[in-house]
Image: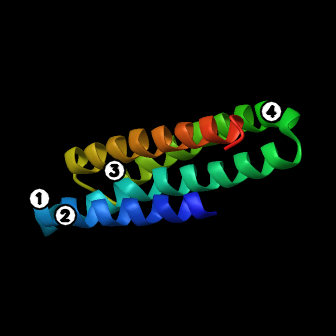
């Protein structure tokens, strides 16, 4: 849970910095672009850590199921945000992509540390 706390703190702090840099008119797009990757990475990390600690042989199955669930979730989320909520696409997609890459890189580094016994 400590890692998820740092993901949340880092994401919120960086979103505030980006909104301050680009202006408040893109604030909604930046924050909503951050939320789905943050939620997915946080849940994914908690489940990964818990599964590996309790039963490492079940981790591959969990990750495959999670991949499928995330594909559906992210597709639906982006569609809803762009079509129904009506966000401006460029700042939303830039934010979503940036947070997606950063948070999944963070999760990969956390997994490397977990698997190494750190």
Residue 15, x across and y down, in percent: 29, 61
Which residue is at 46% across, 64% downward?
8
Q: Secondary structure at mark 2?
A: helix
Q: Find numbered disc 3 in the image and state the secondary structure of the residue it sits on.
A: helix
**Contact (Cβ within 8 Å) of mark 4 with mark 3:** no
Image location of residue 18, percent across then percent down: 20, 59
Query: Viewer-proximal residue, 21 or 118?
Result: 118
Q: Earlier in the sequence, mark 1 or mark 3?
A: 1
**Residue lying farthest to the front in this orientation:** 118
Q: Nearer the viewer, mark 1 or mark 3?
A: 1
Residue nearest the observer in this picture, 49 or 18: 49
Question: From mark 4 to mark 1, how far is it between C-alphas?
Answer: 41 Å
Residue 22 is tagged as 1
- Does any portion of residue 84 appear in the rendered image? no
For marks 3 and 2, the one nearer the N-term is 2
- Residue 56 picture location, percent across and down: 84, 37
Residue at image mark 4: 61
Q: CA distance from mark 1 to mark 3?
A: 20 Å
The CA distance from mark 4 to mark 3 is 32 Å
The residue under the point 77% across, 52% down is 50
Label 1 SS = helix
Residue 111 seen in the current view: yes
- The earlier-in-sequence mark between 2 and 4 is 2
Tell me which numbered mark, 4 or 1, is placed earlier along the sequence.
Answer: 1
**Quadrant location of residue 2?**
bottom right
Q: Residues within 10 Å of mark 3 (few under 14, many from 20)?
A: some
Q: Which label sits on residue 82?
A: 3
Q: Is residue 31 above or below residue 48?
A: below
* Tag 2–tag 1 contact (CB < 8 Å): yes
Q: Which residue is mark 2?
A: 19
Q: Nearer the viewer, mark 3 or mark 2?
A: 2
- Where residue 1 appears, x then y in whole percent? 64, 63
């Amino acid at each position: 849970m400590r890692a998820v706390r740092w993901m949340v703190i880092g994401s919120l702090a960086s979103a505030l910095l980006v909104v301050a840099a680009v202006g408040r008119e893109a604030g909604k797009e930046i924050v909503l672009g951050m939320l789905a990757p943050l939620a997915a990475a946080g849940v994914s990390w908690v489940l990964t850590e818990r599964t590996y600690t309790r039963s490492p042989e079940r981790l591959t199955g969990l990750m495959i199921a999670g991949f499928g669930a995330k594909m559906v979730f992210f597709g639906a989320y982006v569609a809803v945000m762009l079509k129904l909520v009506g966000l401006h696409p460029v700042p939303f997609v830039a934010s979503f992509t940036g947070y997606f890459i950063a948070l999944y890189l963070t999760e990969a580094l956390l997994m490397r540390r977990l698997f190494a016994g750190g």
